[in-house]
Amino acid sequence: MPAPALPPQCQGTHSLWDPLPEVCLQTIDTDRPHQTDTPHVIPAGHTQVESALAELALGGTLGAPPGERAAHVVLFADAYKFGVVSHVEGEVAFKHAEYVPASGRFAPPGPVSARVKWSFVEGGGWVPALTFVPWVFVPVAPSQSLRAGPLLFAGWELGERLELEVNVGTLLSTRPKPPVALVAASALTLTLVGTLRVFVDAYTTGEDAALGTGALLALGRDVQVDAGTYVGLSGEEPVATPFLGLSVRR
């Protein structure tokens, strides 16, 4: 059966200067807390903040010496998103604070992440939604490296309340660990009841690899809370990172 026609005010091109009307908005759709990002973009003319209110990185990073495997507390790792025009989203992300209780000090914030998501295939049935994503990570501390590269995000609605997302691409780095890293990620999300969903995913960037699992709950149309944990498998990923997040759209 064909999808119902959109109301006239929901059709055509919208932008920051001509936002998509409120009546056209659906329930908030976010990248977080998955490590695998969605191919969907936020509605044109609207803004969205996706925040890791708190993350507790336990056991340090897998690649660190035993003496350096102290826990880290990350606060407000936020992504600020803008629906620039229909099918195009701009985003700036930043980790505001990272505290190391063992040393009583804050680690350097950042890096700053900037990217554009261009949704060029909306998808439907077995045809995936496809989004092209040029991405750059700008260092704000000597320990961080400049990284950039293109990625492709894909997503399928599988029926039976299941959604599959896949990310692939490469990131080039100014540091040789490694200078070119393959990015590959996949997430499976199940809607349990209403707006309560659970997910599992796997994510790799070069030598770094992690699994993730958690739950998402939309509180009305424009607010979502989430919680879960990431588990490091290799590289510089923490042993485990439980998290609590909040996303809001305006």
Image (cartoon, rainbow, N blue to C red):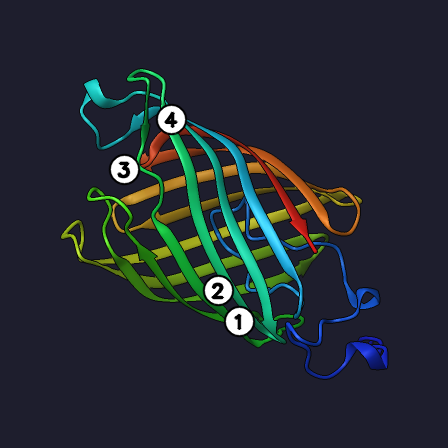
Residue at horizontal 18%, vertical 53%?
A: 178
Whether residue 216 sits left or right of residue 117 in the image: it is: right
- The residue pinned by badge 4 equals 99
Q: Choose mark 3 or mark 4, whichever is in front.
A: 4
Q: Are marks 2 and 4 in contact (CB under 8 Å)?
A: no
Whether residue 175 sits left or right of residue 149 in the image: it is: left
Q: Choose mark 4 or mark 1, whichever is in front.
A: 4
- The residue pinned by badge 3 equals 236
Calculate the distance from the C-alpha at mark 4 to the C-alpha at mark 1: 37 Å
- The residue pinned by badge 1 equals 130
- The residue pinned by badge 2 equals 153
Q: Are marks 2 and 3 in contact (CB under 8 Å)?
A: no
Residue at horizontal 48%, vertical 64%?
A: 153
* Residue 38 screen position, x and y as percent: 55, 58
Q: Earlier in the sequence, mark 4 or mark 1?
A: 4
Calculate the distance from the C-alpha at mark 2 to the C-alpha at mark 3: 24 Å
Calculate the distance from the C-alpha at mark 3 to the C-alpha at mark 4: 17 Å
Q: Earlier in the sequence, mark 2 or mark 1?
A: 1
Whether residue 65 sits left or right of residue 18 in the image: it is: left
Q: Are marks 2 and 1 in contact (CB under 8 Å)?
A: yes
Q: Quadrant of the C terminus?
A: bottom right
* Residue type (three-letter) at the residue carrying disc 3: Glu
Q: Earlier in the sequence, mark 3 or mark 1?
A: 1
Q: Earlier in the sequence, mark 2 or mark 3?
A: 2
- Under circle 2, the secondary element is strand
* Residue 111 versus residue 56 in the image, above or below: below
* Residue type (three-letter) at the residue carrying disc 1: Leu
Q: Is residue 210 visible?
A: yes
* Residue 137 screen position, x and y as percent: 33, 56
